Amino acid sequence: MSMKAFSPEQSAGQRLMVGFDGIEFNPELRFLINTLKVGGIIFFAGNLVNPEQIKALCASIQAYASSCGQPPLFVAIDQEGGRVARLKEPFTQFPGNPKMKGPEDAMVFARTTSNELRTLGINMNMAPVLDVVPEGVDGVMVDRVFGPDPIWVSQLGMVVIEHLQANKIMAVAKHFPGIGRTILDSHLDMPDLETDVDAMETFDLIPFQAAIKNNVAGIMLSHILYKKMDPHWPASLSTAIAGDLLRRRMGYGGLIMTDDLDMGAIKNNYDIHTVIRRIIVSDIDIALICHAGPDIENAFKEILDVQRRSQTMKAKGMSSLKRIMRLKKRYIG
């Protein structure tokens, strides 16, 4: 589909990845795909029953998008292994990143998981976790990370990225620029960190720099307020972190997305209109909204409005659309 043929509504909708309620194709999905023209869907445990149901749901979503003249959708899931694995048995269960003993374990996880996801019709995995929890820190991510050494995290993370993407599953590295040091859970409210960029470059950013060199499809931003890097906005809404640090200083030209905008760190502090304006100005491509509700439609309207009112924001929107469509062409066809 030529980008010149995209309507303003399609350009706006491609910037959204959203969740939904239900286990089968339903009117809610019709509205999201045909009216809001969303670019992606994310699955959670409540959407998933068994392999046959998931495969049928994925096929229905893509068939309906095609019938509406829409590009194929990103269909995403969190399948890290261990504590965060939406697919339960009969899918292969892994003990999680902290239990990996070396690259062989990472390769087996990525190959097995990518085969299972591809068979279902899922094309994006919100993995690997590239956060690094320092020794002695009881951080919120301690049971989800590869370990306390950024070189080790880089080594295993790159194996996961390589073997997911070799098997046509887009990998999304998270949570930039690193939440390994945080104690407060951003699902509940917004944590803050005093660490500056120089300290992070010698520790937290090392795995993300490796991921960039290895052409990771996507990078997910955290909802942490890094006070010395941007005293006003969390990473997921920060021009200093998403635009200046990740895009320009680190040279990342791939897909940047927020973490779930329904999390307490964002919902307790900002309205959806402010959030969307920050996302657009910060060169962030995709707003992730994981729960059904009015925020999805309001986000769509705000993107549409901002891109119509400002030529600068329209140009930024076209840059995001190019990144989105480049990935879809490469991985989904």
Image: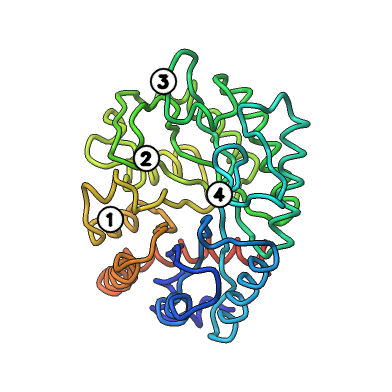
Tell me the residue that label 3 is attached to. 199
Q: Which residue is drawn at 51% across and 83% down?
A: 5
5 lies above or below 320: below
> Which mark is nearer the camera, 2 or 1?
1
Distance between the Cα atoms at labels 1 and 3? 28 Å
Distance between the Cα atoms at labels 2 and 3? 14 Å
Which mark is drawn over residue 78? Answer: 4
Q: Which residue is drawn at 46% across and 82% down?
A: 34
Distance between the Cα atoms at labels 4 and 2? 24 Å
Mark 2 packing: few (<14 Cα in 10 Å), some, or many (20+)?
A: many
Dot 2 or dot 1, earlier in sequence: 2
Distance between the Cα atoms at labels 2 and 1? 15 Å
> Which mark is nearer the camera, 4 or 2?
4
Dot 1 or dot 3, earlier in sequence: 3
Q: Which amino acid does label 3 sit on?
A: Ala
Distance between the Cα atoms at labels 1 and 4? 23 Å
Q: Which residue is drawn at 42% across and 44% down?
A: 221
Q: What residue type is labelled 1?
A: Val
Dot 2 or dot 3, earlier in sequence: 3
Q: What element carries label 4?
A: loop
Nearest the eye: 81 or 172: 81
Mark 4 packing: few (<14 Cα in 10 Å), some, or many (20+)?
A: some
Tell me the residue that label 1 is attached to. 275
